[in-house]
Amino acid sequence: MFRPTLPLFSQKSKSKSASWASRQLRDPYVRKRQSDPASYRARSAFKLLEINDLAGGFLDHGDVRAVVDLGAAPGGWSQVVAQRLGWGERRMPRSVLLGERRGAEGSGDSGLDDAGEFGLAYPAKKAKRKSSKVKVKEEEELTHYDPLNIDSPLSFSTTKGRGTILAVDLLPIEPIHGVRTIQGDFLLPSTSRLLTSLLQNSNNFNSSNSDGKVDVILSDMAANLSGNDTHDIQNSLEICESVFEFARGHLRSAESIGRKRGGVLLMKFFTHPLLESFKLTTLKPNFNHVMYVKPDASRASSREGYFLCMGWNPR
Ligand SMILES: C[S@@+](CC[C@H](N)C(=O)[O-])C[C@H]1O[C@@H](n2cnc3c(N)ncnc32)[C@H](O)[C@@H]1O
């Protein structure tokens, strides 16, 4: 006979959600996000704010013309970038923001420090994502390209900022004023090609980026944790290598800007000797300054850290 299973009511999942809820209640950054007038979509916005301040405001230089945000959903980092580049605030009614997306909150399936931190919960379909399927349907994955979001009825600001901001994620990103969003797998060549072409044509939207280069590349990307350490570290390394390859082709050099710390790459990784060796052999020889950063807003229990690389100086 058919016997239904009720995983949602299992003891294990109840205690998991209870511990998630209690961690959220205790987390000062969750509370800060709720009360902050900027209405950040993700607690992780505070990590970028902190790193940017720590590093002398790499987003704030007047010569920053293009920023790429990889693994950007739900959009906390992109909101910070848009503010810093003068795109002004874009306010949406809270009812619109929360709307249909209620329900998946706290699913915590990313296995990351960031799991469940978002004010905008991931859509339920995230749990079903499979990378093999993504690879087969390579071209179909680029489904959501929202040029500049300026015409969005949800965009209430008309302020024009000083740069091009491109945000990429496997998941859709709700509009952010001044940010062009791409839904796609960054690890696929088609996504990188699309980014390249948008950067090269960014003069259409913005007067001064004729070489199609990027001043700041941010990557908060991380694959869902599988529980298999070797596999998870391999994924983290693969992401870091792809981001570095993108940087090699697109980052504006410190020399061309005339600032020793110009040309910035900030990327998340999981601490492991293999990643340490990647820092020594790949990052250090190509940047004037490479730092390991663990912002206060990153939970101490998490293995995540960030490589902050400043002054692109390729050898
Ligand atoms: C920690 S979240 C980013 C949070 C974001 N920085 C913010 O402030 O809102 C990590 C994101 O990386 C995305 N991601 C993971 N692998 C990816 C890939 N191969 N291509 C694009 N996005 C990816 C996930 O979908 C997830 O949304």
Image (cartoon, rainbow, N blue to C red):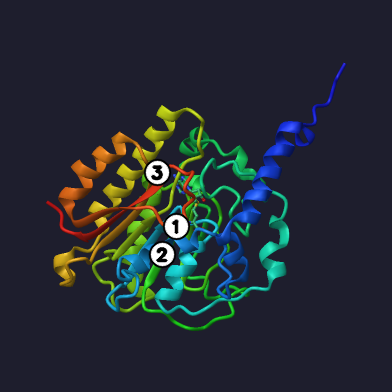
The crowd level at tag 2 (other Cα within 10 Å; few <14, some 14-19, many 20+) is some
Disc 3 from disc 2: Cα separation? 31 Å
Nearest the viewer among 299 and 175 is: 299
Q: Is residue 123 left or right of residue 298?
A: right
Q: Could you tell me which residue is drawn at 57 percent across and 66 percent down?
A: 32
- In this figure, which residue is indicated by the disc labeled 2? 50
Picture coordinates of residue 225 (x, y %)? 50, 36
Amino acid type of the residue that numbered disc 3 sits on in the rendered structure: Leu
Sequence-first tag of 1 and 3: 3
> Is any part of residue 147 visible from this angle?
no
Q: Height in image: 1 above or below 73?
A: above
- In this figure, which residue is indicated by the disc labeled 1? 296
**Mark count:** 3
Sequence-first tag of 3 and 2: 2
Q: Quadrant of the N terminus?
A: top right
Q: Secondary structure at mark 2?
A: helix
**Beta carbon of the mark 3 residue lies under 8 A of ligand 1:** yes
CB atoms of marks 3 and 2 within 8 Å: no
Sequence-first tag of 2 and 1: 2
Q: Quadrant of residue 202?
A: bottom left
The crowd level at tag 3 (other Cα within 10 Å; few <14, some 14-19, many 20+) is some
Amino acid type of the residue that numbered disc 2 sits on in the rendered structure: Glu
- In this figure, which residue is indicated by the disc labeled 3? 188
